[in-house]
Image (cartoon, rainbow, N blue to C red):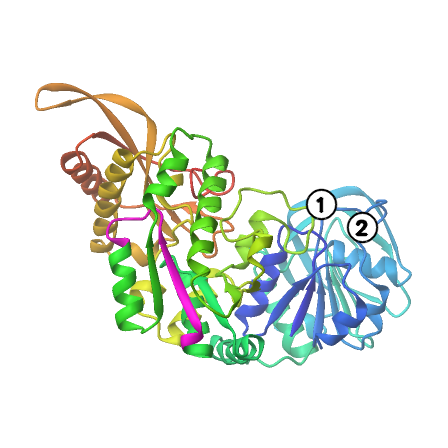
Amino acid sequence: MIVVIDFGSQYNQLIARRVRDFKVYCQIVDPGIDIETLRGLKPEGIILSGGPASIYDKNSPKAPAAIFHLGVPVLGICYGMQFMIHALGGDVRKAEKREYGFAELKIEKPGPLFDKLPEATSCWMSHGDSIVSLPDGFLPDAYTENTRFAAVSNPEKGFYGLQFHPEVEHTPKGKQILKNFLFNICGCRADWTMKTFAKDAIAEIKAAVGDKNVILGLSGGVDSSVTALLIHKAIGGQLTCIFVDNGLMRQDEGKRIKKLFGRHLKLNIRYVNAASAFLEKLAGVTDPEKKRKIIGRVFMDVFEAEAKKIKNVAFLAQGTLYPDIIESQSAFGGPTAIIKSHHNVGGLPKKMKLKLIEPLKFLFKDEVRKLGETLGLPDELVWRQPFPGPGLGIRVIGEITRKRLSLLRKVDAIIVEEIRAANYYRKLWQSFPVLLPVKSVGVMGDKRTYENIVALRAVTSSDAMTADWAKLPYDLLGRISNRVINEVRGVNRVVYDISSKPPGTIEWE
């Protein structure tokens, strides 16, 4: 276990991912964590993340000074290093010259943190404050042209500080530095795998649930599917999955879900056709946030009504992931801005009086896929591209109608078929169409047309935190466009979205 104390860095999740890449479990905690709670986690080491604040700001985040008396190694990164130096009696001041971007790091005292690194290497700097004097026992390890104390250490205490960011790709030897901290300094073992995670999670679910029953809203996506199978392996028939067909699903979605989970995986499934209820409430609504809220509200009404038919239910399971929490709010109530409301984040209606089970809430998507493989989930589900909770409701821009949904389903089916045929499906994070609320002029069969425009969105990513538009082959794009325009009545133009995230988002709404 490595604990990352989150001081608000945009890279805090990246630190956790880097640690987990080395098969060492890592958990992010708020700087206000109670020291006894932190002690109870029994960390082998602590990483203090960077952050946008200055250590002398009135409201700058502070962790308990007692973390330096736990007897475990501590690595401070950027602001985390400045906090450590300041807390232990050193001096941090506004730098005469700020340092952002690439810098050449020159290592003057190798030590265990810089094992297997050359004497000079590139690093990524991002700071406006600098250390001007070190606490007793600290020594300078490395410097840049602009920063005298680019890396420092107190080996006797196990304290290390880096003014640069080792977790980003722009620091080429950063992964090696983190690896050295984990294994050379903290003495971690590379034994955290999805197999061990599953074993622990199953035991925890059994202990928590006891003889009560659990309900889960099954969508057929990777997250809810892995959650369902994990809980099923823990408590078997005590789990009931409720599949709500909201009328916003893709082509033949309901049939596939019932066949795969009911017949093949032997899970208890209740199928509820509630398309009319959703579409009636969505009639005339065009604002994307209102759509999400309506879809979420109607889902809970339908779900609650079905749940009441099941006896002895005490728990609701959700496939919430780390990115869900991060994008809806800070994982620990911090200042992260809300980007959009997620359908499975935000708690339960008080009247349901159920406890939450979220066994995946500290996992990233790629880890969930590995867990799915470990549990024996079929490849078609493990590698299914993410599909939003509100479904096609946020891919039909503007008003949602049965006719517009039907059109988009046909386009979506063609895109999936062509992407799979070209062996690009698993290379992409997501690929889907968006129906625009505008029409364009065209010519078909020597006749003038005025019909719908469909935007194709295809992106590459590892965790949806950032994404880049996919450089699909022109001939593939051409086949998709040709088939859509020829086979889907009502579309006469296909455009390709070449926006990255940031500044855009993956979904259009």
**Range of magenta residues:** 237-253
**Residue highlighted by disc 2:** 130
Farthest left residue? 445
Circle 2 — which element? Answer: strand
Q: Is residue 407 left or right of residue 445?
A: right
Query: In x, y percent, where is residue 468?
Result: 43, 46
Farthest top residue? 448
The image quadrant that residue 69 belongs to is bottom right
- Any mark on residue 272, and which? none
Q: Amino acid at mark 1?
A: Glu
Badge 1 local density, few (<14 within 10 Å), some, or many (20+)?
Answer: many
- Quadrant including the C terminus: top left
Badge 2 local density, few (<14 within 10 Å), some, or many (20+)?
Answer: many
Q: In terms of depth relative to the viewer, which is nearer, 463 or 318?
A: 318
Q: In terms of depth relative to the viewer, which is nearer, 404 or 471?
A: 404
The image quadrant that residue 265 belongs to is bottom left
Q: Is residue 340 above or below residue 325?
A: above
Q: Earlier in the sequence, mark 1 or mark 2?
A: 1
Residue 474 visible in the displayed image: no
Q: Is residue 221 above or below residue 505?
A: below
**Residue highlighted by disc 1:** 99
Query: In x, y percent, where is residue 248?
Result: 34, 45
Q: Is residue 351 left or right of residue 88?
A: left
- Quadrant including the N terminus: bottom right
Residue under the image location 68 percent in, 57 percent down:
105
Residue under the image location 51 percent in, 59 percent down:
320
Query: In x, y percent, where is residue 139?
Result: 83, 67
Q: Amino acid at mark 2?
A: Ser
Circle 1 — which element? Answer: strand
Q: Are marks 1 and 2 in contact (CB under 8 Å)?
A: yes
Query: In x, y percent, where is residue 119?
Result: 66, 65
